[in-house]
Amino acid sequence: MASSTSSYLKSCLKYTSATLATIFVTSMTAATYYRPIPATSPTNNSTHTNTHSNDRRTTQSFCSPNSPPWNRDHVPLLLQWARGISIGATTLAIRLVMNTYGRYEIREDVCYERFLEAAIDARREQQQQQSSSSIESSQTTSSAIPQQRGLLTVSNHRSLFDDPGILSCLLPLPIAIQPHHQRWGICSQEYCFNDALPSYIKGYIGAGQVLPICRGGGINQQLLLDFGRHLANGEWCHVFPEAGVWQWKELGGRRELPKGAVWGSASDFKDDEQKGDISDNSTNNHSNNNNNKSVIIPATTAQRSLPPSPIGKLKWGVGKLIAHAPITPRVIPFAHCGMERLLPQDEVSGKTYLRRDFVKSLLPSFLCNNDSDGSGGDGKGLRIQIQFGHEIKFDDLIKEHEEKHGKLWKYRGKEPTSESNNTAMQQENWVSSREERILYSKIVKRIEMHLEVLTKEVCR
């Protein structure tokens, strides 16, 4: 009897393992097939960053002909499983490091409660509404389906590991491992979707609800519109509006360049020098004659000494997402510090690197001395502090603009499948006018004002 029971248990374990392995392989294969495709990097007189993603997908091997945005009701089952695996595994791994070998502190005040309400309760209500109206939606055109109010969080950017390092730890763990509650993020394609990475790695990142953005592609790029459509579907989206890593005790971002100077590149993946996109144009023009010019590298002591830019520190893409959303999203800022202990930034080159004593810093406190900060290790362990701010309103700015210049065009999350030219129409309307850019700058300066205060307070 004991022998037969043991044999039965072994068979069950064998078939269970085979089933789980099959689910994992097929899910990751689906994630690879539906992976996000980056844009062509901008060059002089180039508009390739505005090429629609479906056109780019036709040139890729083992790639679906159609891409997001999908409403969650329409996501293929295997891709749903892949998202669960990617987000669940990543979140659990991050929590293990952050909470076991360091201190992770969120100021649990009314602002944090408002964030949880927006990220959890509002998402759950929208999901219930979508489920209850699924039968009616199938009997109507997609264009008749109402858009949802999304949640947009903005924060400072302290390291390349802020997402998922910070974003994975904002929600309670049982909620954080559920894809429909997790954020959608964007990552510079030179880091997360560069050609050196295998397709299945890009698929895993994409299944983690991360989309590529082209650094230097400007506010008219198709990738930003693709990201915005998730916001129109009522999703939680997150943006780092500094568009780079700054480990100062204040908000980073743009500074005013001296006459004759040009921006350099602090990228860990390319060393070419390029002019700064200080007017948020659709492309970054690469300079071929920088030998006689002063080169300023972002996030260095040379940049810090410059005066603030008259057009603001932050990039205008976040302002465009807010202005053209079908329903103005809830915008909640937060600031954090501590990730610079994991990936410090060189003040001369602007590049980040993994701290040399990283392994020692992860040792539990009882194995090391000098635990001055209570985080374990040598007193320089991980100690993450996060503080949320009040929701930021923009109704007055949008109303003022529309009274002067007419109604703003609004992008949509769920596209009418019967209109073959809808994508081209969306991209044509996505190109911003001068008046719209002025509105974006006003929106972003308001975000900057709130985020500056939070950053200085949490980093002091």
Image (spheres, helix red, strand yellow):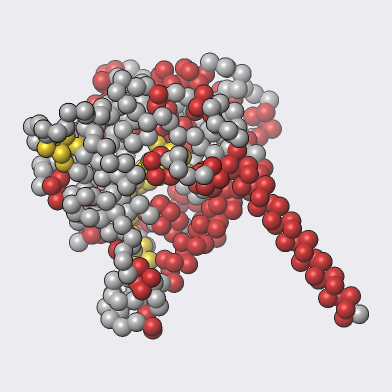
Residue 207 at x, y percent in the picture: 54, 45
Spot the residue most to the right.
1
Q: Is 326 located above or below residue 115 in the figure?
A: above
Residue 264: quarter of image: top left
Q: Is 130 located above or below residue 416 in the figure?
A: below
- Residue drawn at x 47%, y 44% is 197
Q: Nearer the viewer, residue 350 or 252?
A: 350
Residue 39: quarter of image: top left
- Residue drawn at x 40%, y 24% is 48
Spot the residue most to the left.
259
Please give left or right for residue 339 compared with residue 171 in the image. Answer: left
Residue 337: quarter of image: bottom left
- Residue drawn at x 21%, y 50% is 349
Q: Nearer the viewer, residue 127 or 295?
A: 295
- State the quadrant of the C terminus: bottom left
- Residue drawn at x 65%, y 39% is 76
Residue 188 at x, y percent in the picture: 38, 41
Q: Is 335 located above or below residue 263 in the figure?
A: below
Please give left or right for residue 142 compared with residue 99 in the image. Answer: right
- State the quadrant of the N terminus: bottom right
